[in-house]
Image (spheres, rainbow, N blue to C red):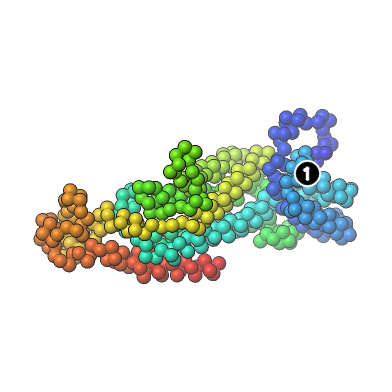
Amino acid sequence: MALWGGRFSQAADTRFKQFNDSLPFDYRLAEQDVLGSISWSRALVKVGILTAEEQLKLEAALQDLLAQVQADPEQILQSDAEDIHSWVESQLIERVGDLGKKLHTGRSRNDQVATDLKLWCKTQGAQLLLTIHGLQRQLVAVADAHQSTVLPGYTHLQRAQPVTFAHWALAYVEMLERDYSRLQDALARLNLSPLGCGALAGTAYAIDREALALDMGFAGATRNSLDTVADRDHVVELMNCASLSMIHLSRFAEDLIFYNTGEAGFVELSDKVTSGSSLMPQKKNPDALELIRGKVGRVVGAQMGMMMTLKALPLAYNKDMQEDKEGLFDALDTWHDCLDMAALVLDDIKVNQARTLAAAQGGYANATELADYLVAKGIPFREAHHIVGEAVVYAIQVAKPLEDLSLAELQQFSSVMAEDVYPVLSLESTLGKRVAKGGVAPDQIAAALAEAQARLAAR
Ligand code: ARG
């Protein structure tokens, strides 16, 4: 039976009912709906709507229902209730009879659904923080194992300057650190309870909303009832967090897809996260990474969709807002799965140090060093840059790296070149010179790694 039958004399068209019902997706809010209802029943005792005895009876039935939905949430889908709120109420009435009909006193589905969804966001957000943390730990472990594994660093996908594999992994630890703190911020902001705002104007019972909020684990109660039932900022914010983090993950995926190509051969992905071709027996495709890269589309799409749904919606609640759930659920599920999959990819990744070293040595990644050498000999940088450019053209012609050119060959470009140029052109020297904070000198990498390890351990 619908919650609102009294005013109606005709049953809903089945096609409309199907269109209107949200149970097929909001059944995921069952736990939150029951927990919010338990707290609401306690608040109703304080305002004299329920006796202590009635409340105990309701709470026992709700706890029983909670255990049932925790054991098998999908059973809810058997019902043809309109939404999770109707379902919980009907289950309660089945268990305790008419007493169950008292629970909705002073409450609206508008403050109820807002409360349920925020409670769900809190639980899901806490889980996502752990998952981000897990991937960061995995990246730090990779960094630890590859502190001295040289990797070519790229700009414009052209070999630019050598870095280390540790430095690459720690770059993603930083991106995920911002994702983590952004999510924490969003969770802190949404941590105010809507319950007791009624349909839009506030509830007509003198509910202590602050106490009610604390009872549900919120930090406090929202301030304005009209805003509260119309507010889905937290949905957009969490999807923002998901979108940006997914963009980070897509870059991670793209880097590794490239490193894993036959052409680069820097890493080899494990059989556990790759798949074969039905036609070409030699293939081992980086599907896990490609899916991570691809799924950013649906997450950003869901975020855009939600923003468009909210645009120009008049205050306060409108049914449009029921569209908040599917996109949010999918975006957060997808984000979670991709974080998890990224960690799995790193689990068994093999780095081919011979290939990364050879690539870092080729590609004239030490050309900047040669320019700096000339600067140290008194040549202005712009001029040094030009000289080295010419030397590189020559080196390409004779198919040699800069360090294999003879002194006579180097002196064609500048007479200040001397024997002391060769140590400067070595990879060790190139890496070792980047001693300022955030650079690739071995001491800096070691310090960055120790700092990241300590930060993650302290959390
Ligand atoms: N199923 C609805 C939703 O998800 C619950 C709120 C319904 N409130 C209402 N006044 N129709 O938004």
Identify the residue at horizontal 80%, vertical 39% (top origin). Answer: 2
Q: Is residue 193 visible?
A: yes
Left/right placement of residue 389 relative to residue 165 reads: left
Residue on which the image places disc 1: 86
Identify the residue at horizontal 36%, vertical 70% (top origin). Answer: 443
Q: Is residue 173 above or below residue 116?
A: below
Report x, y in % for residue 188.
60, 59
Q: Quadrant of the N terminus?
A: top right
Report x, y in % for residue 353.
36, 59
Left/right placement of residue 138 relative to residue 329 reads: left
Identify the residue at horizontal 36%, vertical 50% (top origin). Answer: 264
Q: Observer-nearest residue: 352 or 407?
A: 352
Left/right placement of residue 405 relative to residue 60 reads: left
Q: Observer-nearest residue: 303 or 345?
A: 345
Say which element carries label 1: helix
Report x, y in % for residue 55.
85, 57
Q: Is residue 455 above or below residue 251?
A: below
Q: Observer-nearest residue: 115 or 397?
A: 397
Q: Quadrant of the C terminus?
A: bottom right
Q: Is residue 178 visible?
A: no
Identify the residue at horizontal 43%, vertical 59% (top origin). Answer: 169
Q: Is residue 210 above or below residue 447?
A: above
